[in-house]
Amino acid sequence: MRSEGADSGSVFFHYNCSFDAIGTINRHARTDLTAQPSYVTSFLGVRVAPKFFPGILDGKAGTIEPIPIPANWHADIAEWAAALRAVDLALERFRVVELGCGWGCWLNNTGAAARNKVSIRAVTRARDARAMLN
């Protein structure tokens, strides 16, 4: 599946990997999500307050984002697939460390993808830890 209006000539379709990147992203997409009025909800169920990204997420509160193929405001196919592949490769536990992450983007996204699969340990050194509390 692709994001609505995705251009097959987009530069974000040009990546190289040894696994099915698009299949990996699609397998992790949740279909049981409910929009929350004050947040933008990702295809993984991660909620982000638009106030943390003014100009980018303005007017998107209460929405659920489509699968980010080829990309969304946060990352492209290569980044999403690599992060979710790490979750797929976790056996009993998934550990992630993110430094200087601001709102904990990859901690939140990979943690959400791993939460029903394995135990999770996430560590961060965020410049704005308040962002991760909302």
Image: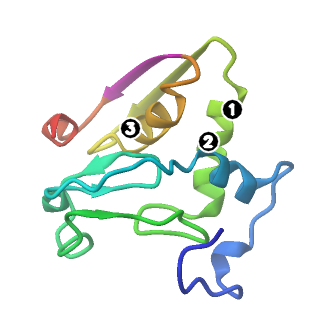
What residue is pinned by disc 2?
Answer: 84
What residue is pinned by disc 1?
Answer: 88
Residue drawn at x 17%, y 69% as measured from the top left: 54
**Amino acid tagged 3:** Asn
* Residues at marks 1 and 3 touching, judged by CB atoms closer than 8 Å: no
Q: Earlier in the sequence, mark 1 or mark 3?
A: 1
Q: Quadrant of residue 10?
A: bottom right
Q: Is 65 part of what is drawn in magenta?
A: no
- Nearer to me, 8 or 66: 66
**Amino acid tagged 2:** Leu
- Give the main secondary structure, helix, strand or loop, of the magenta stretch: strand
Residue drawn at x 53%, y 65% as measured from the top left: 68
**Amino acid tagged 1:** Asp
Element at label 1: helix
Magenta-highlighted residues: 119-124
Is 11 situated left or right of 47 in this image? right
The spot of residue 128 in percent (x, y) is 17, 41
What residue is pinned by disc 3?
Answer: 108
The tag on residue 100 is none
The spot of residue 65 in percent (x, y) is 40, 64
